[in-house]
Amino acid sequence: MDSVTDRILSDYQEYFAQLRLEIDLFQQKQLNAIEQLQQQGEQASQQAYMEVLTALSSEIDNTRLFALIDQDGKGTLKHITGNFLADCEEEIAETVQNGVQNKLFLHRSKSSIHFDLLQPLATKSGKGAFFFVAFNPDVLINLLKKYQLPHQQLFLMRADSLGEVELTTETEHSNTSELIIGGELKSFNFVKAIPNTRWQLAIRLSPQYSSNLYRQNLIKALLIWLLLTLFIYGFFRQQKHSLRKQLQVEQALAYVDNYDQLTGLANRVNFDRQLSEHIEANHILTHNSINANTIASKQVGVVIHIDLDKFQVINNSISYAVGDKFLHQISISLKEFLPDDAIISRLGNDEFGILLPELLFSEAKDFAHKVRLLIQKIRIVEYQQDTNITASIGVIILDQSIFDAQQVYSSLGRAVNLAKEKGGNRVQVYQSDDEQLVLHAKEMEAVHDVAEALKDDRLLLYRQKIKPLGRQGSCHYEVLIRMKNAQGMLVPPIHFIPAAEKYGLIRRVDQWVIENTFKMLALSPDDKASYSINISGVSIADRDIYDQVISLFEQYQIPAKRICFEITETSAITHLKSALHFIDKMKAFGCQFSLDDFGSGLSSFSYLQKLPVDIIKIDGAFVRDMDTNPINRVFVENIKRTAEAMNKKTIAEFVENAAIEKILTDIGIDYGQGYHIHKPEPWYEASQK
């Protein structure tokens, strides 16, 4: 029955869309006559009205009358058309109020029935007014009859007046409205609302047809049930077989995704996941423990990294097949030797990883030596050659200083490299007193501290004044970064910036500094000073940095001329192409650039010609003692002359006393910066924002 009502609704919608179009076209044709009727209003003649109505009836079938509705919903031609029915007045009021007419309005009087359409009046003064046309309902009745099947009775009923029939294919209901109540209302087999109207279509089947249909449906249902039961049984058996095969395929794919095909050991992805879960579980245990300090002091396992010495020589000089045999035999030997709770992985071509959750620190080094000897004893005889292999082994203890798997890999990589540098075939414990490992451990701790500080809002901004020398000038500051450790103590940048640069965190730090500098400037409208922001070579090399910085300028509405980006000589030379691209685009936007630590490189003057910076910042190493070191004074004088020739300003760092300031002024250096001029002062703290 959906198909019947859907087709009726489709035809109905198409008909009314066409009808509205025809009304609009008619208005355009009769625009002058309609506009004259609108202007004359109650003074309009019936003859003029009838001329327009005759034209309308000739162009649009089933037209009964038309009217002009003003902005207040009142008919302006009532002296000709008469008053509207109550339903019509309600419809007109809703249309004027909403600006749009609902899709269908039927109106019935004691003697007739019609439907109305309201279209916006097309005249020049017709804004908010409507062109009202009433039509005979023959088209709607024909739509019902067109899709009526022999066993059906179709009705058009009001949805807002329960059971009130307006149109029907039944002759006894065709001329007058009738209420259907009680059991008769329940006898409708299908009722569907017409969208955006107050009407609904109803279908009632003949009693005999309903009875036959019930019996047929019952028989069909039994047959369907029987067929469905047989189908489900067959489908279940097929699905069971398919699921078994699918499970086998999934298991095979999971094995491929998680295990090395040659050795059968866990691959790096699998090992990385298990190692990360082990570290995370340990941190959660510590966090939830009442006596966290005691647990934090304990180690929770050991990770061993095995790197076979000169394995590529075996592949190249003997054969890859022999190399594969070695790898396979090593995996078998490790499985037999290691405890059941050990997790073994082939990390790379000639590398293995072992996680030993229960191995103690005191036993770790001796255990690693046993693994080394185990590998050394493995021999492969091929092509009458007796071949063995050795391994360099790194060991790291898992304690609370380990915060993720990447730190473990980085630390083990350092330990293995050190073992190889010492000749190979040896064990290197990461927590040893070796200077390189101690330095790496401190760097990793610094990286961890920076990451935690970014997460916990423990970074701070300081600022230091840059003073014009020997003249009056605008105020300028350099933005400096500081960090508070977990205990709230201030950490100078020398203790964390180098590690952040080395291990890839400096980009996040740069973004934090730029955004919070802009935020402070936006919050301080009385501050008219310009600011210098340090930006690293890593950030300069980032292809997205320009768009990100421009976005922050737009977000905080900071004038570009107030910002000067400082890049170090080393980072500019290392990332020369990226630096030139970034400098050119930001200078075009309106920013300035200064070259920091100038003179520290071997080719400073050579690269200065390639970098379109505005300011040269002289390395403090040449400034801090120039009052007692004449060589450094000469060097600063040469930089000044070079900058002057290139039309660039100069800033001297590390101005620590009045004597240095006077010398710089005499030389003609433009700006000075240092503790003698201004000590760095706190400016912004994220945790207090």
Image: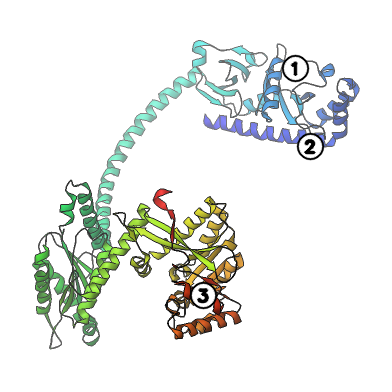
Q: Distance from label 1 to label 3 (Cα)?
A: 98 Å
Question: Picture coordinates of residue 202 (x, y %)?
Answer: 55, 22
**Disc nearest the viewer among 2 and 1:** 1
Look at mark 1 in the image and give the residue it sits on.
84
Q: What mark, if any, has residue 153 been given in the picture?
A: none
SS of the residue under disc 1:
loop
**Disc nearest the viewer among 1 and 3:** 3
Name which residue type carries label 2. Answer: Leu
Name which residue type carries label 3. Answer: Lys
Look at mark 3 in the image and give the residue it sits on.
662
Query: Can residue 139 be seen by looking at this rendering?
Result: no
Q: Nearer the viewer, residue 145 or 555?
A: 555
Choose the circle earlier in sequence order: 1 or 3.
1
Q: Distance from label 2 to label 1 (Cα)?
A: 25 Å
Splitting the image into 4 quarters, where does residue 414 fall? bottom left
Residue at 74% across / 31% down in the picture? 119
Question: Picture coordinates of residue 543 (x, y %)?
Answer: 49, 67
Left or right of residue 34: residue 165: left
Look at mark 2 in the image and give the residue it sits on.
25
Question: Picture coordinates of residue 535 (x, y %)?
Answer: 47, 67
SS of the residue under disc 2:
helix
Choose the circle earlier in sequence order: 2 or 1.
2
Name which residue type carries label 1. Answer: Phe
Q: Residues within 10 Å of mark 2 (few under 14, many from 20)?
A: few
Q: In the rendered image of this protein, does residue 36 appear above or below residue 244?
A: above
